[in-house]
């Protein structure tokens, strides 16, 4: 039965949309490529393993590791390549959350490269003159959507602490690809001709139009000499090459242009500092799962895992409708709490301890009955009084995982937010629209502020939740993560349950159909008919018209080496040596 289920799930992937954007802007022209065979996307290796969303990025990471580089070295090089070949998802102008496992100390560190709002931003950032929230894409395309980019600064910090190869050398593969050109992939070609407003923005049209006036398409050679020059400055000066000097001036100049110009200043860029802290590590089954802290999606994912810890889901399996019912109801409860309480802990009180208290999680799990019913947020210990959230979070982003020859591990989710970020470019790269991850409405009707309201210097809440799994004794077990906007929480939950509870291989785990249950909505890939019928009888009617577009990557320890898997909904591969 399980084999039949996996085949049915794999067949469903052909129907998954490839944009990762809101359903309203999913490009009809960007059809999902036929799912590659597991042999092409998965891999096994004795010494190192990399799984990333584009084969060029994966190979770059493996090459760095083959030269003796560390997992952090490989992460720097992979991000530089992804920003070039997958600009719809991440880049130099975006942000990131990364967790790092040190094989010697068994310590897991969370690095925060989340974008920040300029100091001139207010809680009315996304309100129009009438006091009502702006239409979402009007906000996205404005200069006001761009936050101070943090991914490069975060990687710079991590490299100073854990890098082995020279920083400047890590940008050479991407610089060569930018100068000599790279082959446009089917996924990028679909994004270029998509209906997303950013793809039709002047900067994007200019970049993606060939001399003959036609858009670049699959198989074309695309060069980006401006990107190569930007990499040269970053290679020479580190993050300062991006956040100060001529590139910083270009960023400020571009976001100050209309419509809806930003208040971003050179001082905002120069003052940016990434942060690091201990990862948020909590038990799940017989393992310990580590994620970043708030404002990442880590707390939300941990809530969902904690609720499922109170169920028998691990004793079931992917062919059991009751397992998916438990999964969906735990997801709904976790989303309700996450949406209510999680924001930037530097500005608002996030009751993480109360939300993850075993007694509270047991109370929440007890709400899972035999049929789906209404779901609302709970009141954990230390809960502040906050208003409802009105965040509209599209599903761009990228994820990669790395294990180096010393056993050090990186799990990193990286983003410019939506398709091509804000649609604005400077010096060969797209600027993020990350500030639209704030609640567009800062208060409830009675004036109660939302936890994720905009504010000066504030980081917007994120769904990004890269995960690393350990034994209770601190040995590495697995690493995983996904892009997908607010659906990241459900995608990551699925792969962790499949890997740790159902003991599936990485490739089978990431290939399982997705189910995103939030509020009264059940977005899903097509499931086998018996499961869909059984869920409907429990009050869960799956909406499968669009498909759920994850981009999962996973690595597990297996047979004295590492096995990796890449989501067949995208173009990724897992490779090592």
Image (cartoon, helix red, strand yellow):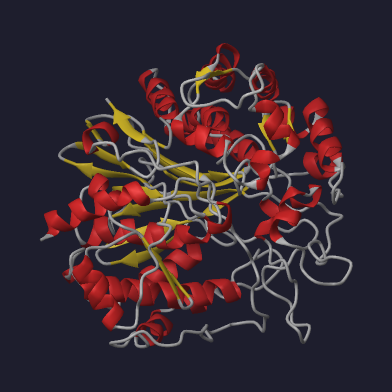
Pinpoint residue 359: horizontal percent, then vertical percent: 39, 84
Q: Residue 182, image x and y in percent?
A: 51, 19
- In front here: 291 or 481? 481
The quadrant of the image that shows the N terminus is: bottom left
Residue 200 visible at all = yes
> Residue 363 falls in which quadrant of the image?
bottom left
* Residue 342 spot, x, y in % from top left: 59, 69
User: Which residue: 24% across, 39% down?
Assistant: 563
Q: Is residue 332 left or right of residue 118?
A: left
Which residue extends farthest left?
1
**In the picture shown, does residue 250 fall above or below 438?**
above
Residue at image coords 81%, 45%: 268
- Please name the residue shown 30% across and 48% down the image: 478
Residue situated in front as seen by the camera: 423 or 72: 423
- Farthest residue in the top direction? 180
User: Can residue 49 be spotted in the picture?
Assistant: no
Q: Residue at x 52, y 76 (%)?
A: 337
Vertical order, 434 against 167 (above or below): below
- Left/right placement of residue 325 relative to residue 263 reads left
Quadrant in the rendering for residue 561: top left
- To which quarter of the image does residue 525 belong? bottom left
**How many numbered discs?**
0
Q: Quadrant of the C terminus?
A: top left
Residue 16: % across, % down:
39, 51
């Amino acid at each position: 039965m399980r084999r039949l289920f996996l085949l049915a799930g794999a067949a469903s992937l052909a129907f998954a949309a490839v944009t990762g954007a809101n359903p309203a802007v999913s490009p009809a022209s960007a059809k999902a490529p036929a799912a590659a065979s597991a042999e092409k996307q998965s891999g096994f290796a004795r010494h190192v393993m990399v799984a990333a969303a584009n084969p060029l990025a994966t190979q770059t990471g493996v090459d760095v590791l083959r030269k003796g580089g560390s997992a952090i070295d490989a992460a720097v090089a992979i991000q530089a390549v992804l920003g070039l070949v997958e600009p719809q998802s991440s880049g130099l102008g975006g942000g990131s959350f990364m967790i790092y496992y040190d094989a010697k100390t068994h310590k897991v560190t969370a690095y925060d490269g989340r974008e920040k709002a300029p100091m001139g931003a207010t809680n009315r950032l996304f309100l129009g003159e009438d006091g009502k929230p702006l239409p979402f894409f009007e906000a996205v395309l404005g200069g006001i959507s761009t936050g101070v980019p943090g991914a490069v600064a975060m990687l710079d910090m991590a490299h100073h602490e854990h890098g082995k190869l020279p920083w400047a050398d890590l940008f050479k593969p991407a610089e060569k690809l930018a100068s000599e050109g790279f082959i446009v992939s089917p996924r990028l070609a679909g994004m270029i001709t998509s209906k997303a407003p950013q793809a039709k923005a002047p900067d994007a049209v200019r970049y993606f139009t060939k001399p003959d006036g036609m858009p670049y398409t699959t198989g074309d050679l695309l060069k980006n000499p401006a990107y190569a020059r930007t990499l040269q400055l970053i290679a020479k000066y580190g993050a300062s090459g991006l956040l100060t000097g001529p590139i910083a001036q270009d960023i400020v100049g571009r976001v100050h242009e209309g419509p809806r110009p930003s208040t971003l200043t050179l001082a905002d860029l120069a003052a940016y500092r990434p942060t690091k802290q201990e990862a948020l590590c909590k038990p799940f089954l017989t393992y310990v799962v580590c994620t970043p802290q708030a404002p990442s999606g880590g707390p939300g994912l941990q809530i969902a895992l904690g609720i499922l810890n109170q169920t028998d889901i691990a004793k079931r399996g992917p062919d059991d409708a009751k397992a998916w019912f438990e999964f969906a109801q735990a997801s709904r409860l976790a989303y309700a709490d996450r949406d209510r309480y999680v924001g930037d802990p530097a500005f608002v009180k996030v009751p993480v301890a109360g939300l993850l208290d075993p007694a509270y999680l047991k109370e929440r799990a007890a709400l899972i009955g035999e049929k789906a019913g209404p779901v609302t947020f709970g009141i954990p210990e230390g809960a502040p009084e906050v208003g409802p959230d009105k965040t509209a979070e599209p599903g761009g982003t990228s994820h990669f995982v790395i294990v180096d020859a010393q056993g050090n591990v990186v799990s990193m989710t990286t983003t410019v937010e939506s398709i091509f970020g804000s649609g604005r470019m400077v010096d060969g790269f797209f600027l993020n629209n990350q500030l639209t991850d704030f609640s567009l409405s800062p208060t409830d009707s009675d004036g109660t502020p939302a936890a994720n309201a905009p504010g000066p210097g504030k980081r917007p809440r994120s769904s990004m939740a890269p995960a690393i799994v350990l034994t209770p004794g601190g040995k590495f077990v697995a690493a995983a993560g996904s892009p997908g906007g607010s659906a990241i929480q459900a995608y990551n939950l699925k792969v962790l349950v499949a890997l740790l509870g159902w003991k599936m291989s990485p490739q089978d785990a990431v290939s399982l159909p997705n189910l995103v249950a939030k509020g009264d909505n059940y977005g899903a890939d097509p499931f086998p008919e018996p499961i869909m019928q059984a869920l409907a009888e429990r009050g869960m009617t799956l909406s499968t018209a669009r498909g759920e577009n994850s981009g999962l990557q996973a690595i597990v320890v297996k047979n004295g080496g590492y096995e990796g898997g890449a989501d067949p909904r995208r173009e990724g591969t897992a490779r090592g040596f």
